[in-house]
Amino acid sequence: MAKLKFCLLFTACVYICSCLQHLLLV
């Protein structure tokens, strides 16, 4: 269960980071 939470958190972090990079590049 904890592993699933960590996986979701990691995926969310990666998603947010790519969104931020995209916004900074534009």
Image: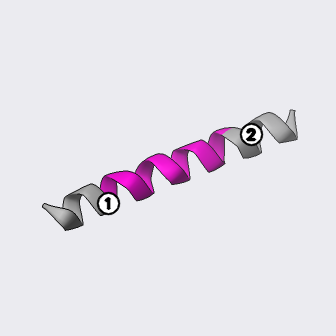
x, y percent for residue 6:
75, 46
- Across and down, in percent, residue 1 comes to 87, 32
**Marks 2 and 1: CB-CB under 8 Å?**
no
Residue at mark 2: 5
Secondary structure mostly seen in the magenta stretch = helix
Q: Residue at x 53, y 45 (%)?
A: 12
Residue behind mark 1: 20
Residue 11 among magenta residues: yes
Please report the residue visible at 45 percent of the width from the left and 46 percent of the height from the top. Answer: 15
Label 1 packing within 10 angstroms: few (<14), some (14-19), many (20+): few
Image-based side of 1 in relation to 17, left or right: right
Residue 24 is drawn in which quadrant? bottom left
Residue 11 x, y percent position in the rendering: 58, 43
Q: Residue furthest bottom?
A: 24
- Residue range of the region highlighted in magenta in the rendering: 8-20
Q: Residue 8: image x %, image y %?
A: 65, 39
Determine the secondary structure under disc 2: helix
Q: Amino acid at mark 1?
A: Leu
Amino acid carrying mark 2 in the image = Lys
Tag 1's secondary structure?
helix
What number is the disc on residue 11? none
| 3 with respect to 15 (left or right) | right
Q: Measuring 74% from the left and 39% from the top, which residue is drawn there?
A: 5
In the image, what residue occupies the spot 19% across and 65% down? Answer: 25
User: In this picture, is 26 found above or below 7?
Assistant: below
